[in-house]
Image (tube, helix red, strand yellow):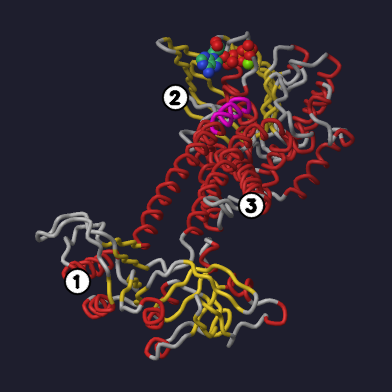
């Protein structure tokens, strides 16, 4: 089987400039992730994990280096192009779920398809399928504030998956959940990965990291360790 | 940009944020409501004043004789000017461009009777053209004609009020009957209606001026010359008046600038003055109305700014899911336009409704009647609303499109 390279970054540098201070967050990161891999990123608070994930998610830009996503050089894209790539290639899962508070579970899940100009009826049918896969069919018409943390995260995962992305980027997806719920969420993410989607998880917890195939440790803006689990 | 799906997206956000939507829309609804009310009141005033001008051509000129007030060629002041048939002929031949022309004699109120019925009515001898100058509507028969004048016929044209006073019951048909005017019998040949608001104008009796001079005066004196200026411009009409004045001044030896020797009433000029006044009032109303709407728009814009701030996280989420900047601009702009248009429409309907109510329930007074907002105003207001919505949404939308998703989505 031929191994496809999904993500490659070479010598990525990123600094934040606040007023007169410049904070060098990423100091030349090299990373290569194949299609279908499931990796975790660990590191101390402030080490640059989220920054890296945001660059991978084309939500943020980098100062120098190279980022190639599925063979496409991601550099100085127009906002429009970046939005389209996020919509078609990437799915996000966040610690705080980031569901739209006034939309119900189904509408939240359907939102990425709205930006693919898929008609409402069709969107909602597909959204129901994904909710069903998450075991949340009966919660489809509930607003986020009527759902538990675990349910919210499953809605968020369904939303991340609905656009059939190639990469799922999860920034501390279990950070706000208890250990049992965390394991349930990891079960789902493993299933997602088993279906061939590349999964990248930022986490602080060892037992979460252990459920991925590879763990990358970032220390002070550099990759200091890569461990096969 | 305006597919059904977008509307549904807007509808769902609007529906789920009712209070916010209400607050946003209220100021705009109020602005439009006030504008419509103001414009309606303006038109009410205008209609009221227009009513005052009814009855008589708007291009009519009336020239009456008076007393001199300026010394001229050694003649003292206070001299009474008396027009005669000669003056009428001179004006008729030397003034160019008039449409209809008539002389009048003032004989005051006279006792007029038919059988046992009688009343005091204003007797108004004139030429055939006076029916046109006064824009009388003949409800029966005819007005005075040239043969009446040349043959000194004793015929009379009576007003609706005269008819209803004198001709009652079995004698309700006035045509061909003889009425007694100060002891002289005149045959009724027509009944007219005058569109003037003044009731007295319906209580007139018109007779041929030639007959009146012979029967009641015994001389060829007249009191007034009136004519219409046709399609003439204001300047041309002024020229006609000037010419009449100079002819009369020469015949009677008085200063042409002596405004007491002869008195000119140029209705067109009065109408023009009022038109200018109302154009001014309308402009003033639009300025105030626009001011109110601008205040509303600024309000909407402010609230939308706060809304965008509130929705920063949502916008960040949308961007992470693939919303382009343009789609965010469209989302906010369309919401602003929908809210302003809808709210404005409500204001429009309420305003027009209130005007209708006033129009129906309130009796018209001398200077106020039928307040109305016409179609063009409604169209203008609608266009204004959509523009206002776009303006109100523009800055918040740009702000929304600039939201940085990384910042918006960061966990606090
Ligand atoms: N928009 C920004 N402007 C300025 N500094 C920033 C910005 N975003 C992040 N930083 C700084 O960059 C550094 C790395 O932040 P980052 O969020 O990547 O850390 P992290 O590894 O995800 O930490 P944590 O585990 O606490 O989430 C931190 O010092 C942070 O304060
Ligand atoms: Mg982080």
Answer whether residue A222 is visible to the viewer in this image. Answer: no
Tell me the quadrant of ligand 1.
Answer: top right
For label 2, the residue is: A64
Residue shown at 63%/79% (left/top)? B115
Kindly indicate whether the residue at mark 2 contacts the one at mark 3 (C-beta within 8 angstroms).
no
Label 1 and label 2 in one chain? no
Q: Residues within 10 Å of mark 3 (few under 14, many from 20)?
A: few
Q: CA distance from mark 3 to mark 2?
A: 81 Å
User: What main secondary structure does the magenta stretch of the protein show?
Assistant: helix
For label 3, the residue is: B363
Camera-nearest residue between B254 and A97: B254
Camera-nearest residue between A212 and B52: B52
- Respond yes or no on whether mark 2 lies under 8 Å from ligand 1: no
Q: CA distance from mark 3 to mark 1?
A: 47 Å
Q: Quadrant of the C terminus of chain B?
A: top right
Viewer-nearest of discs 3 and 1:
1
Q: Residues within 10 Å of mark 1 (few under 14, many from 20)?
A: some
- The image quarter containing residue B93 is bottom left
Viewer-nearest of discs 1 and 2:
1
| Region of the chain picked out in magenta, as a range | B301-311
For label 1, the residue is: B247
Residue shown at 57%/41% (left/top)? B34
Callout 3 secondary element: loop
């Amino acid at each position: 089987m031929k191994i496809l390279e999904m993500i490659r970054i070479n010598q990525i540098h990123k600094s934040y400039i606040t007023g007169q201070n410049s904070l060098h967050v990423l100091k030349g990161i090299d990373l290569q992730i194949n299609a279908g891999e499931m990796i975790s990123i660990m590191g101390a608070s402030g080490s640059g994990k989220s920054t890296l994930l945001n660059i991978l998610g084309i939500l943020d830009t980098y100062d120098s280096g190279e980022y190639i996503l599925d063979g496409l050089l991601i550099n100085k894209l127009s906002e429009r192009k970046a939005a389209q790539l996020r919509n078609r290639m990437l799915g996000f899962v966040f610690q705080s779920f980031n569901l739209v508070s006034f939309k119900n579970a189904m509408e939240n899940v359907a939102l990425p398809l709205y930006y693919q100009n898929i008609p409402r009826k069709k969107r909602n049918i597909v959204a129901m399928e994904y909710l069903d896969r998450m075991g949340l069919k009966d919660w489809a018409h509930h607003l986020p504030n009527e759902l538990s943390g675990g349910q919210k995260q499953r809605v968020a995962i369904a939303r991340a998956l609905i656009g059939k992305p190639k990469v799922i980027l999860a920034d501390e997806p279990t950070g706000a959940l208890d250990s049992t719920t965390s394991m349930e969420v990891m079960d789902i993410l493993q299933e997602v990965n088993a279906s061939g989607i590349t999964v990248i998880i930022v986490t602080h917890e060892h037992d979460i990291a252990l459920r991925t195939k590879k763990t990358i440790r970032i220390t002070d803006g550099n990759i200091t360790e890569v461990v096969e689990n | 940009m305006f597919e059904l799906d977008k509307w549904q997206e807007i509808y769902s956000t609007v529906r789920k944020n009712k209070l916010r939507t209400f607050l946003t829309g209220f100021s705009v609804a109020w602005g439009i409501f006030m504008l419509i009310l103001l414009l309606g009141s303006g038109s009410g005033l205008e209609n009221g004043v227009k009513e005052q001008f009814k009855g008589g051509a708007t291009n009519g000129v009336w020239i009456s004789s008076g007393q001199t007030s300026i010394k001229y060629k050694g003649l003292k002041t206070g001299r009474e000017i008396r027009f005669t048939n000669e003056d009428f002929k001179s004006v008729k031949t030397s003034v160019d461009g008039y449409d209809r022309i008539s002389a009048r004699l003032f004989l005051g109120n006279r006792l007029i009777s038919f059988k046992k019925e009688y009343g005091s009515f204003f007797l108004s001898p004139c030429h055939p053209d006076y029916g046109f100058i006064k824009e009388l509507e003949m409800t029966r028969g005819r007005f005075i004609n040239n043969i009446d004048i040349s043959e000194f016929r004793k015929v009379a044209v009576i007003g609706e009020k005269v008819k209803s006073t004198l001709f009652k019951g079995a004698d309700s048909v006035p045509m061909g009957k003889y009425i007694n005017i100060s002891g002289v019998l005149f045959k009724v040949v027509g009944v007219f209606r005058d569109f003037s608001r003044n009731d007295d104008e319906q209580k007139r009796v018109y007779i041929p001026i030639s007959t009146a001079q012979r029967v009641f005066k015994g001389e060829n004196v007249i009191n007034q010359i009136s004519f219409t200026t046709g399609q003439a411009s204001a300047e041309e009409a002024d020229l006609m008046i000037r010419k009449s004045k100079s002819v009369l001044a020469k015949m009677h030896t008085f200063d042409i600038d002596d405004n007491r020797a002869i008195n000119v009433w140029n209705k067109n000029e009065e109408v023009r003055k009022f038109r200018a006044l109302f154009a001014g009032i309308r402009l003033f109303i639009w300025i105030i109305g626009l001011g109110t709407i601008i205040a509303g728009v600024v309000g909407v814009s402010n609230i939308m700014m706060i809304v965008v701030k509130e929705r920063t996280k949502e916008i960040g989420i949308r961007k992470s899911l693939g919303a382009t900047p343009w789609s965010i601009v469209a989302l906010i702009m369309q919401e602003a336009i929908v809210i302003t248009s809808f709210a404005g429409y409500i204001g429009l309907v309420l305003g027009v409704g209130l005007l209708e109510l006033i129009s129906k329930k309130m009796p018209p007074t001398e200077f106020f009647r039928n307040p109305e907002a016409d179609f063009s105003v409604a169209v203008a207001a609608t266009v204004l609303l959509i523009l206002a919505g776009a303006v109100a949404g523009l800055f918040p939308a740009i702000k929304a499109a600039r939201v940085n998703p990384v910042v918006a989505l960061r966990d606090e």
